[in-house]
Image (cartoon, rainbow, N blue to C red):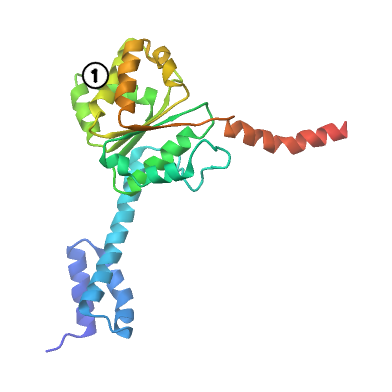
Amino acid sequence: MPTTAQESAKDLEYYTRALKAPRIRDAAAKLAEQARAEAWTHEDYLAAVLAREVAAREASGANIRTRAAGFPARKTLTDFNFDHQIAADRGQIHRLAAGAYLAEAGNIVLLGPPGTGKTHLATALGITAAEHGTRVLFDTATGWVTRLSAAHAIGKLPTELRRLRRYGLLVIDEVGYLPFEAEAANLFFQLVASRYEHASIILTSNLPFSRWGEVFGDQAVAAAMIDRIVHHAEVITLKGASYRLRHTEIETLPSATAENQAH
């Protein structure tokens, strides 16, 4: 006895509920009319329905990974002002966004004065990695040290370092803004060493490598850390004045001009 459309719909409702995949039910209903009108094969119809489900799951997974990463804001490469920051090569940045460095456990280092776009680029590249399936965590250098100090205090530092190695990418922002005590410098070194040739880092710093000894309080520790970071890294040095300060100056210029004219 032939199955009616109503019976088929009930079956589909049951199967998709059992699979916990309600989007398949919705996609099947939406694509059914198009499939009949265009005389799709059964294989074409099934592939189209499953393609909708896979795309939805990937988008959902990307959103979950991005939220879990702890980014301070949502920044994209589309939003980045390459015209203001001419030291950032557009082609190089977009090549890095493709993510080959992640498969090779490579690093990205962004150096330059405050306000030149380091955190924006680091965040945008991190979000892109998350969208492409990589587990990512973001924090400032002091934030990472605080996390490691807490683990060390309860005897769980090795466990925490192993756990962090399961993340394909760590973003370490603002190295150099605050100096580290000896213990903090040692913890930070262990974080870097634990990821060497195993997983990737994106790191930003307002200081050139030649001044990292000031941050970590020991030239030998700084040199060993730099060696591990840059061995498989692309180093990008940004230049110029702070974009934030320049933007503020532009916004205040008309009122200042008007005031001068009034006097």
Q: Which residue is drawn at 30% across and 80% down?
A: 35
Q: Pick the residue in front: 166 or 192.
A: 192
- Which residue matches tag 1? 152
Given residues 175 and 69, the one toward you in this image is 175
The answer to which image quadrant residue 169 occupies is top left
Q: Quick one: which residue is furthest to the bottom in this view?
A: 1
Picture quarter with the C terminus: top right
Residue 202 spot, x, y in % from top left = 36, 33
Residue 72 visible, this orientation = no
**Does residue 176 appear to the left or right of 61 in the view shown?**
right
Q: Residue at x 45, y 40 (%)?
A: 73
Residue 70, above or below 57: above
Give the residue drawn at x 34%, y 27%. Answer: 230
Q: Position of residue 83 (x, y in %)?
A: 57, 42
The amino acid on which the numbered mark 1 sits, given as a three-letter code, is His
Left or right side of 61 for 17: left
Outermost residue to the right: 263
Around disc 1, counting alpha carbons within 10 Å, would you say few (fewer than 14), some (14 to 19), or many (20 or more)?
some
